Image: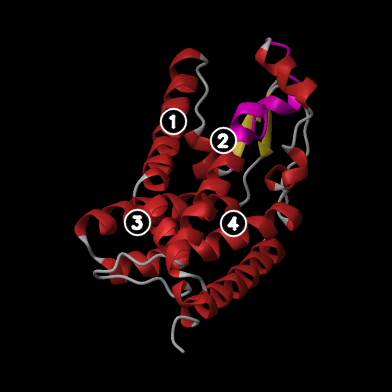
């Protein structure tokens, strides 16, 4: 018997697709040299990351970090084909690792961008608060290894979605669009009502204001 469960609430879905759009935009603007828009998109990513951290504490059931921080033994069992039923609803152990890796790598990329200085066309808003050597080191990471690490994780994420669709016949995109997923056992649904969405809107506005404030620190 199949049960329909609301896995991803609307705020989580919007975060996912907005982050994807911003990351693509960051790559494009970096390659095109459109640094003003690159900085703006970086600020948007900062706001989204702040929101996701907070939403990971107060958001829908399956979006909370507590539901996909797995014990190492649970991860080993999953890799050996003994998945816990919850692994098939929200994030799998490998999916959870991907989420945390992406959040961490993007946070470092945004952080190094904020303090970077390419000595040509762009100086990060927080560059004046660190030493010249530290700023140059951050710039080097941001423009080389960090950039390719982000692109690599995105490609790995897309490859994993394709692999699940091909080998396991699991469509991971549909639930992130519609929110619901059919599962083989009863499971709690993520709260996704008007009050939850209003809370998310307020939190995103606060995170956006915090990001704007950080960007404004570049003006003495």
Left or right: 103 with respect to 165? right
Q: Which residue is mark 4?
A: 11
Which residues are the magenta region?
A: 81-99
Closest to the camera, between mark 2 and mark 4, is 2
Tell me the CA gap for discs 3 and 4.
Answer: 22 Å
At 53% from the left edge and 72% from the top edge, which residue is drawn? 211
Q: Residue furthest bottom?
A: 220
- Reading the chain from its start, which is encountered first: label 3 or label 2? 3
Q: Which residue is mark 3?
A: 26
Q: Which residue is mark 1?
A: 156
- Reading the chain from its start, which is encountered first: label 3 or label 4? 4
Tell me the CA gap for discs 1 and 3.
Answer: 18 Å
**Element assignment for label 4:** helix
Tell me the CA gap for discs 3 and 2.
Answer: 20 Å
177 shown above or below 4: below
| Residue closer to the observer: 67 or 118 | 118
Residue 65 location (% of width, % of height): 72, 45
At 72% from the left edge and 37% from the top edge, which residue is drawn? 68
| Residue closer to the observer: 84 or 72 | 72
At 76% from the left edge and 39% from the top edge, which residue is drawn? 67
- Reading the chain from its start, which is encountered first: label 2 or label 4? 4
- Reading the chain from its start, which is encountered first: label 1 or label 3? 3
Q: Residues within 10 Å of mark 2 (few under 14, many from 20)?
A: some
**Element assignment for label 1:** helix
- Reading the chain from its start, which is encountered first: label 4 or label 1? 4
Query: Magenta stretch: residue 93 in it?
Result: yes
């Amino acid at each position: 018997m199949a049960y329909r469960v609301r896995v991803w609430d609307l705020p989580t879905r919007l975060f996912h697709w907005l982050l994807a759009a911003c990351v693509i935009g960051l790559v494009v603007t970096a390659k095109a040299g459109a640094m003003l828009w690159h900085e703006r998109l970086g600020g948007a990513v900062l706001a989204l990351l702040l929101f996701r951290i907070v939403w990971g504490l107060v958001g829908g059931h399956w979006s909370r970090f507590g539901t996909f921080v797995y014990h190492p033994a649970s991860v080993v069992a999953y890799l050996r084909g003994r998945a816990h039923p919850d692994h098939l609803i929200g994030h799998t152990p490998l999916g959870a690792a991907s989420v945390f890796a992406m959040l961490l790598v993007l946070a470092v990329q945004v952080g190094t961008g904020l303090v970077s200085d390419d000595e040509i066309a762009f100086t990060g808003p927080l560059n004046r608060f660190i030493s010249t050597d530290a700023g140059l080191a951050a710039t080097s990471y941001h423009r080389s290894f960090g950039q390719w690490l982000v692109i690599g994780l995105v490609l790995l994420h897309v490859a994993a979605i394709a692999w699940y669709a091909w080998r396991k016949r699991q469509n991971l995109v549909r639930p992130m669009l519609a929110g619901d997923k059919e599962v083989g056992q009863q499971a709690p649904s993520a709260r996704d009502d008007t009050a939850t969405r209003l809370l998310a809107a307020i939190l995103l506005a606060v995170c956006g204001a915090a990001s704007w404030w950080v960007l404004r620190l570049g003006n003495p």
